[in-house]
Image: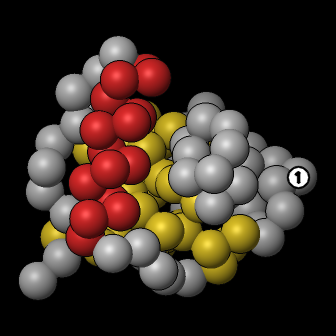
Amino acid sequence: MLTPEEIEELRQRLEKSLNIRLRKKRIRALTVYPTHQQIPNMKIEVGKSYRNLEPGAPPDQVLAIFESVSFLVCTRKRGVEEGLPYFFAREDARKVEEME
């Protein structure tokens, strides 16, 4: 898991590298019904591991979820240590749960 300081550093790095603004609210879970991706409807939660965030993706633990014009789901291999996060369209999001 990432500390609040690491999450803030990641948010700032993604904003700079992707040239987008990310909302500061902390998201705990995101329920998506992807219309244009060949993946199942799912609830994505920080701290849990998934193997189907995109077709053929290896299992990886979700470390952070950010909101912008779309939702960015970050794992160690996608967004945190290397590569780009997984992107989910806003219209595919059915429920957003914030950290308490």
Quarter of the image for residue 11 reads top left
- Is residue 46 visible to us here? yes
| Residue 88 versus residue 69 in the image, above or below | below
- Which residue is identified by label 1? 56
Q: What is the secondary structure assignment of the residue under circle 1?
A: loop
Identify the amino acid type marked 1.
Answer: Gly
Q: In this view, does 91 lie to the left or right of 26?
A: right
Q: Where the C terminus falls, by quadrant?
A: bottom left
Q: Which residue is drawn at 45% across and 23% down?
A: 17
Quarter of the image for residue 57 reads bottom right
Residue 32: x %, y % from top left:
44, 56
Residue 75: x %, y % from top left:
59, 60
- Is residue 37 visible to us here? no
Q: In this view, does 7 lie to the left or right of 55?
A: left
**Crowd tier of the residue under label 1, counting other residues whose Cα lies within 10 Å: few below 14, some 14–19, many 20 or above:** few
| Residue 62 versus residue 82 in the image, above or below | below
Residue 92: x %, y % from top left:
41, 43
Q: Which residue is drawn at 26% across and 54% down?
A: 8
Q: Which residue is drawn at 32% across and 29% down?
A: 15
Number of numbered markers: 1
Residue 97: x %, y % from top left:
22, 71
- Who is closer to the viewer here, 82 or 96? 82
- Who is closer to the viewer here, 53 or 3? 3
